[in-house]
Amino acid sequence: MLKKVFFFGLMVMMAPAAVFALSIDGTQTQGKGTVSVGVGTEYLIKRDLATKNKPVGDNANYSSEKITDLYRVYVRPSIGIIDGVDLYAKLGITDYDAKMKADTVKKEWDAKQAFLGGAGTKISYEITQGLIWGADIGFAYSKNSGHFSGASQRWTMYEWHIAPYIGKLIGNFVPYVGVKYDDMRIKARTSSGSFYKYRAEDQVGAFLGVDYGIGEKVCVNAEGRFVDEVGLSLSVNYRF
């Protein structure tokens, strides 16, 4: 309960804006040699999983597998390596739950907070005056310990996406829409050394969002992701 209050409070303080897991954190690149630092939070409400591997001897039929209540809070440093191309990192903490059925028995995974690491690149190009095309390629990694229906396990999560989009500059706003391929995979290790492997059931989704510029230094980003996942996220970036 406390972690939900913390993340909800953080999102309220950072309003107006909202997004989903592995957000693109804005549409525009910042220019060669320019450095920016952002802070962000993501909340994944639900993402369906499928079991891809289980130990020999486990004959249960798994169903209704899903990630729930995934939280990420991170710092995002970025640098423009050339005009139209940025490199960035994401460093923070993450926490999440999972639910599934083994035959008719409900099981739950409750993770402890762990380090979140990630990196990526953003490309953007102004096609015509005010019309922006871009793409974001990002990767995130975490290794959480926790309990799965009372038994100790360690879950390692890998997620990467490629997300092309198109946006339109309207005053201080840049609304945008895009499609993405987002692949999430989890490797779970039990206390006995056995392994389970899970993968997101759907990899293709859609997203939409908006940037809002405050002066020349600050940009607030809000974005929503659908189809393959459902969640929320916010970010604020400061350009030096």
Image (cartoon, rainbow, N blue to C red):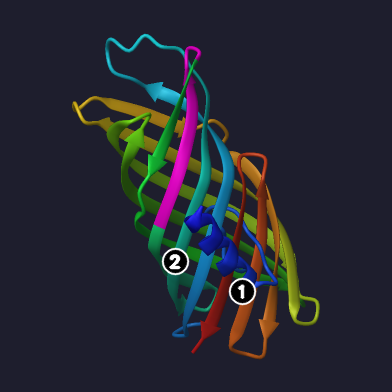
Of residues 221 and 88, the one nearer the viewer is 221
The residue located at (28%, 18%) in the rendering is: 55
Magenta region includes residue 103: yes
Specify the principal SS of the magenta part.
Answer: strand
Magenta part of the chain: 94-104
Q: Say what amino acid the circle numbered 1 marks.
A: Met
| Disc 1 + disc 2, Cβ < 8 Å | no
Q: Secondary structure at mark 1?
A: helix
Report x, y in % for residue 115: 33, 58
Is 17 above or below relative to 206?
Answer: below
Q: CA distance from mark 1 to mark 2?
A: 15 Å
Q: Residue beneath label 2, please?
A: 74
State which mark lies toward you, 1 or 2. 1
The residue located at (47%, 36%) in the rendering is: 98
Report x, y in % for residue 100: 49, 26
Report x, y in % for residue 52: 41, 23
Of residues 142 and 124, the one nearer the viewer is 142
207 relative position to 138: left or right: right
Q: Say what amino acid the circle numbered 2 marks.
A: Tyr
- Judged from this view, the residue extending furthest toward the front is 1
- Judged from this view, the residue extending furthest toward the left is 192
Within 10 Å of disc 1 (Cα), the crowding (few <14, some 14-19, many 20+) is few
167 relative position to 203: left or right: right
The total of numbered circles placed on residues is: 2
Is 101 above or below relative to 216?
Answer: above
Q: Residue beneath label 1, please?
A: 13
The residue located at (39%, 45%) in the rendering is: 158
Q: Secondary structure at mark 2?
A: strand
Is 19 above or below relative to 68?
Answer: below
